Amino acid sequence: MNKHIPLLATVLIASFVLGLGLLSTSPSQTISENATELSQHIVDGGPPPDGIPPIEEPNYAPVESIDMEDEEPVFIYNTKEGTYIYSQRILVSHEIVNEEFDGEKVSVTYCPLTGSALAYNGTMNSVETTFGTSGKLVNSNLIMYDRETDSYIPQILGKGIQGELQGKQLELNPLTWSTWGDAKEVYPEAQVLTEDTGFARNYDLDPYGDYLSEGTYYDSGQPFFPVQHQDLSEEPKEVYIGIWGETPVGVKKEKVRQEKAVQIDTDEQALVALYDERLDAVRVFDREKDGETLDITYESGEGFVDDQGRTWSAEGESKDLSLDWVESFDVFWFAWHAFFPEADVYR
Amino acid sequence: MLTQKVERVLQSKKSKKIGVIGSIAFFLTYLYSIDSINIHLTSVGVETVPNWTQRLLDTRAPYLWEPVLRLDLGLISLFLHPLNILLALLLSFLVFLTITTMAYMYKNPKTCRVNKTGIMGVLPASLTGFACCAPSLSLLLAPILGASSTVLFINILPFFIPLSTFLLLLGIYLLLKDIEPIS
């Protein structure tokens, strides 16, 4: 036995050293959104590329054939062809659904770690593409990779940080975060993503937490992975509406829920966040219309009203006018602040 | 000489029984930890994923392959890949040998030399149990370890299975070394 100890010890130590060699370097302390610096904060999330496999051939079924708890989160995508509903319980295992609507490629994306759901147009630089999961994270957020160029694109940022598409911005489409109970009532004719995804997966299991219970990852605790910037003045998992706009702005969803209409004014833009009670959802619109800035408030019994007496729906529509949707989405506070530490905050 | 010692250990029916129970428990725990088993009310049926032959090498993580077969058995659903089963069986066999040998040594102290390697025998089996649950364990430990340690943990995950396999083999060797061969 004694003669074997040195050899065995060598093998053990070599294994440990090899493991150490794969450790990522400690993150820089520099504060910046610059793509190069952001790419230095990329960490390995565990799976290989597409180890969390996107759904490439989604199947749908009518609302009445789907059995889910009413409180389960779903993401609603409206197209000219109709409305499509994606459940969080399926997307937590796939994170991306690559689809085609109205002749255009669309990717519905969801990152469970940052509580963010965004729908991206799949045309970039005049090239149609689809997205995969890289297995990497930055600020705890899913990094997608573009299958045409292998460029890395953080889901919340929507902008390439590595590769040929570095600095290029994806186009965001409206995706509404709601619950199954609300969604099926508002959109009874919708098509719902089924578990016939082309994968043999256990969709009863959410490895991160549970939206139907309190005290799990989705409503408490700290991020699982390092983030560039932290602001502990707010609960990390508090839901904010992240607004790209001309300049990024974060609005606490609970504030909009309470006030129904929250006007957002910066040097570059005049916006309004409107609360849709039917879906417990928030949409953000540009208040600039035909050269004038509207003043839109909520009046009990009247709904959303502007300073010219017009009433507006929660979808930003009036009798013969419609407001322009501003790129925005639900997101955990810690993730929004990590990417946009200098953004204005409404809470 | 080692094979003779293994034969001697396997002659003990009681030790083998304990080893079988332990290895079956390990096998099921391993499959459960990699989400291959879901206990719930379901129908009865078998379904393969589309183009399953082309997807046999798709991985979800190091040493974890994407299931290509779903088996519904009324109260339980199984999500299977042949390589996941093979790895589970291999590890379970090593656990079987470890536990059987330890049980034999416990019951036959007179046939064994000083059992100072008992702890070394336990350690690799424990580590393998740790490794088998690692993908889910990393998320479970994240709140305790903190964000930076989670990254460290993720980076050493690929080595858990080979290291555990090596330590199990080492443990078995060290245990067998203390057993007198059949005279």
Image (cartoon, coloured by chain):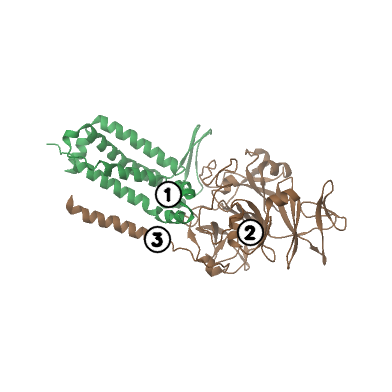
Chain colours: A brown, B green
10 Å crowding of disc 3: few (<14), some (14-19), many (20+): few
- Residues beneath discs 1 and 3 located on the same chain: no
Subunit that carries the residue with mark 2? A
Q: Say which of marks 3 and 2 sits in front.
A: 3
Q: Are marks 1 and 3 in contact (CB under 8 Å)?
A: no
Left-right relation of A327 to A27: right
Identified at 82% across, 59% down, the residue is A295
Subunit that carries the residue with mark 1? B
Q: Which residue is mark 1?
A: B64
Percent of width and height locating residue B170: 26, 47
Amino acid carrying label 3: it is: Leu
Q: Please say whether residue B14 is visible from this viewpoint.
A: yes
Q: Which residue is mark 2?
A: A120
The image quadrant that residue A18 belongs to is bottom left
Identified at 78% across, 59% down, the residue is A323
Identified at 74% across, 46% down, the residue is A277
Location of residue B173 with respect to A162 vertically, above or below: above
Q: Say which of marks 1 and 3 sits in front.
A: 3
Q: Are marks 3 and 2 in contact (CB under 8 Å)?
A: no
The Cα–Cα distance between marks 3 and 2, rounded to whole angstroms, is: 33 Å
Percent of width and height locating residue B175: 23, 42
The residue positioned farthest toward the right in the image shown: A309
Identified at 66% across, 42% down, the residue is A180
The Cα–Cα distance between marks 1 and 3, rounded to whole angstroms, is: 19 Å
Amino acid carrying label 1: it is: Leu
Amino acid carrying label 2: it is: Tyr
10 Å crowding of disc 2: few (<14), some (14-19), many (20+): many
The image quadrant that residue A309 belongs to is bottom right
Q: Which residue is mark 3?
A: A22
